[in-house]
Amino acid sequence: MQRPSVLVVDDEPANRMFAAKVLAAAGWSVAEAMDGTEAITAAVRNIPDLVVMDLDMPGLDGWQATAAIRAAEPPLSSVPILAYTSLRVTDAELLARGLDGRLPKPSSPDDFTEAAAGWRIDGQVDVARRLVAVFGEDEMTQLVTRFRAQLAEALAGLAGGADDLHAHRIAGVSGTLGFAAVSEAWLRLSEGDASATDAARRSARLAVAAIDRDWPVPAAS
């Protein structure tokens, strides 16, 4: 199985080296960038499965680099991006500005590895691929395309604090299509378990990224 890829972006060599070496030891294929401009170039050249982004950098900073990645075409636009920063910034601000969460900085190697492990997207569409034998290629692509749109709408609802997220529908569809982590988290959310919100958001983001990477959906006409 191909190793998941990560792009580590930080202007401080010690921080960049720490993250790169810890993630490489944990089985990630690592690329590095020292600022936002390098990060965008590297991400366009080889789209990673995850970006670990410092926010406070000279020149093009992490906020600007994140905005540029989000403005790109899929699959680059949907790559999960985690803040790697000691800035005092809230999770709500990170989400509002296109990031998906954070990795602790500073942290121990074990804590860093564990935090990153939850953002691996490899294997996300494997079960869905096997369902082609049931639905057929064209029908399955249509189902996955619709599912991706539902996930994007649900993620926007979470970010906006919407109450009606159709969480039970998301749980059912994702289970049918083989996205077990999405189904589990969104079922908990549909049952009123507010503690499942972060897991629901993460599972949906990973599913969108995996679909864009491994099962490109047709462009809207």
Image (spheres, rainbow, N blue to C red):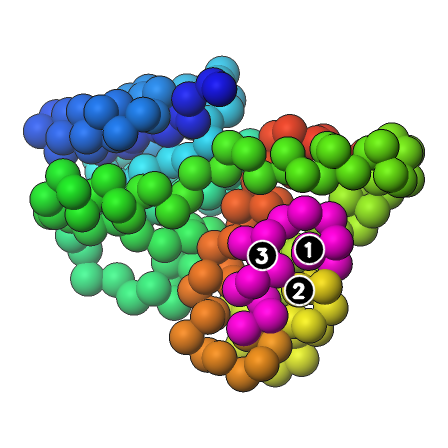
Q: Position of residue 67 (x, y in %)?
A: 47, 44
Q: Say which residue label 2 marks.
A: 171
Q: Please tell me the numbered disc located at residue 195.
A: none
Q: Which residue is found at the position 50% from the left and 24% from the top? A: 47
Q: Residue type at mark 2: give it.
A: Ala
Q: Earlier in the sequence, mark 3 or mark 2?
A: 2
Q: Is residue 29 visible?
A: yes
Q: Position of residue 118 (x, y in %)?
A: 38, 47
Separation of residues labelled 1 and 3 (CA atoms):
6 Å
Q: Say which residue label 3 marks.
A: 182
Q: Which residue is found at the position 61% from the left and 60% from the top? A: 183
Q: What is the crowding at mark 1: few (fewer than 14 residues within 10 Å), some, or many (at least 20)? A: many
Q: What is the crowding at mark 3: few (fewer than 14 residues within 10 Å), some, or many (at least 20)? A: many
Callout 3–callout 2 Cβ contact below 8 Å = yes
Q: Secondary structure at mark 1?
A: helix
Q: Residue type at mark 1: give it.
A: Ser
Callout 1–callout 3 Cβ contact below 8 Å = yes
Q: Which residue is found at the position 14% from the left and 39% from the top? A: 109
Callout 1–callout 2 Cβ contact below 8 Å = yes
Q: Secondary structure at mark 3?
A: helix
Q: Residue type at mark 3: give it.
A: Val
Q: Which residue is found at the position 53% from the left and 64% from the top? A: 185
Q: Say which residue label 1 marks.
A: 174
Q: Quadrant of residue 101?
A: bottom left
Q: Secondary structure at mark 2?
A: helix
Instruction: Give 86 or 48, whichever is nearer the viewer.
Output: 48
Please report the bounds of the magenta region as a residue range: 173-188
